[in-house]
Image (cartoon, rainbow, N blue to C red):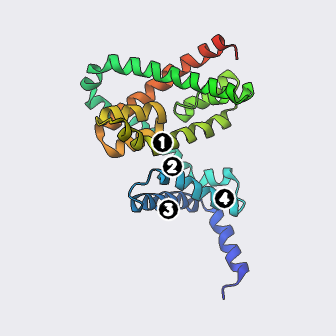
């Protein structure tokens, strides 16, 4: 039988090694992706959500501070920047198609962003949420860095906004296919655009994995939604007198 003291020493050593947390993160995602594919792409087994659940469980069980984990896994965080910039390549290649649909894109982004803000506000007031929580919820439909920036600017709680944003993205990406099939939406461009508008980064990743054109329109929607929402949220706050 292995001595418990030796096991503990091994665990302490592994915790101090940045490569361990990087390996854990990649391993959790590969496991989640395996389960997702084995379930025949069951929407509620979204790989991002499951991998976060797996990593969070390890951190909680072994009482590991998030800062220690992030120090080891921050290389993946660094790669988010180049990955986002790389979205410009398929957008450039499909620029003419985007220009041809520019009118529909702008109108849809404006209506979709405004609807998201207003429905969030009215549901929040219906459930009697306090103003700080409402302000944290309003930017939830844009990509996390922009949402947190808007939240901080308007007096919300950025950390809460990040949670709401992530939850919105996972739910949207998980249920999108069911909704599209239910409503008879077949065009991949329309599906991708809706995913980017409602589910930002997670939705864009899902769209890109399904179809290149869907990913292109999703990336366009994600970027423009962030821009429009950052303008509309302060205006709505002023008009609604929050």
Name the side, left or right, on which 48 lies relative to 210: right
Q: Give the mark nearest the N terminus, 3 or 4.
A: 3
Q: Nearer the viewer, mark 1 or mark 4?
A: 4
Mark 3 vs mark 2: which is more N-terminal? 3
Residue 222 left/right relative to 167: left
Label 3 packing within 10 angstroms: few (<14), some (14-19), many (20+): some
For image coordinates 35% across by 46% down, the residue present is: 209
Q: Quadrant of residue 57?
A: bottom right
Q: Nearer the viewer, residue 114 or 65?
A: 114
Q: Are marks 2 and 1 in contact (CB under 8 Å)?
A: yes
Inter-mark Cα distance, 1 to 3: 18 Å
Q: Residues within 10 Å of mark 1 (few under 14, many from 20)?
A: few
Q: Which residue is located at x 52 percent, y 33 percent?
A: 143
| Residue at left offset 75%, top offset 27% | 130
Question: Badge 2: how crowded within 10 Å, few (<14), some, or many (20+)?
Answer: few
Mark 3 or mark 1, which is nearer the start of the sequence?
3
Residue drawn 70% across the image and 24% down it = 155
For the residue labelled by badge 1, is the local secondary structure a helix, a strand or a loop? Answer: helix
The spot of residue 20 in percent (x, y) is: 57, 62
Q: Under tag 3, what secondary structure?
A: helix
Q: Position of residue 131 (x, y in %)?
A: 73, 24
Residue at mark 3: 27
Residue to which mark 4 is pinned: 59
- Left/right placement of residue 27 relative to residue 133 reads left
Nearest to viewer (mark 1 / mark 3): 3
Q: Which mark is residue 76?
A: 2
> Mark 4 and mark 1 in contact (Cβ < 8 Å)?
no
The residue labelled by disc 1 is 80
Give how far apart the Cα atoms at labels 3 and 2 are. Answer: 13 Å
| SS state under label 4 | helix
**As drawn, 41 above or below 120:** below
Nearer to us of marks 4 and 2 is: 4
């Amino acid at each position: 039988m292995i001595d418990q003291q030796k096991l503990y020493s091994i665990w302490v050593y592994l915790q101090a090694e940045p490569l361990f947390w990087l390996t854990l993160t990649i391993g959790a995602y590969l496991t989640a992706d395996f389960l997702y594919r084995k379930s025949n792409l069951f929407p509620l087994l979204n790989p991002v959500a499951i991998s976060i659940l797996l990593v969070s469980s390890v951190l909680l069980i072994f009482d590991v501070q998030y800062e220690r984990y992030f120090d080891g896994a921050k290389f993946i965080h660094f790669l988010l920047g180049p990955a986002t910039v790389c979205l410009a390549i398929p957008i450039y290649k499909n620029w003419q198609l985007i220009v041809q649909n520019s009118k529909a894109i702008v109108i849809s982004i404006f209506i979709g962003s405004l609807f998201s803000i207003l429905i969030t506000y009215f549901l929040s007031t219906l459930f009697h949420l306090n103003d700080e929580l409402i302000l944290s919820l309003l930017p939830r439909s844009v990509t996390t860095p922009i949402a947190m920036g808007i939240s901080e600017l308007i007096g919300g709680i950025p950390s809460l906004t990040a949670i709401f944003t992530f939850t919105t993205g996972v739910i949207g990406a998980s249920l999108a296919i069911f909704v599209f099939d239910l409503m008879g939406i077949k065009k991949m461009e329309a599906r991708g655009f809706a995913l980017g508008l409602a589910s930002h980064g997670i939705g864009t990743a899902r769209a890109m994995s399904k179809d290149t054109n869907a990913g292109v329109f999703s990336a366009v929607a994600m970027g423009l939604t962030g821009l429009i929402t950052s303008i509309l949220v302060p205006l709505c706050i002023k008009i609604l007198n929050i």
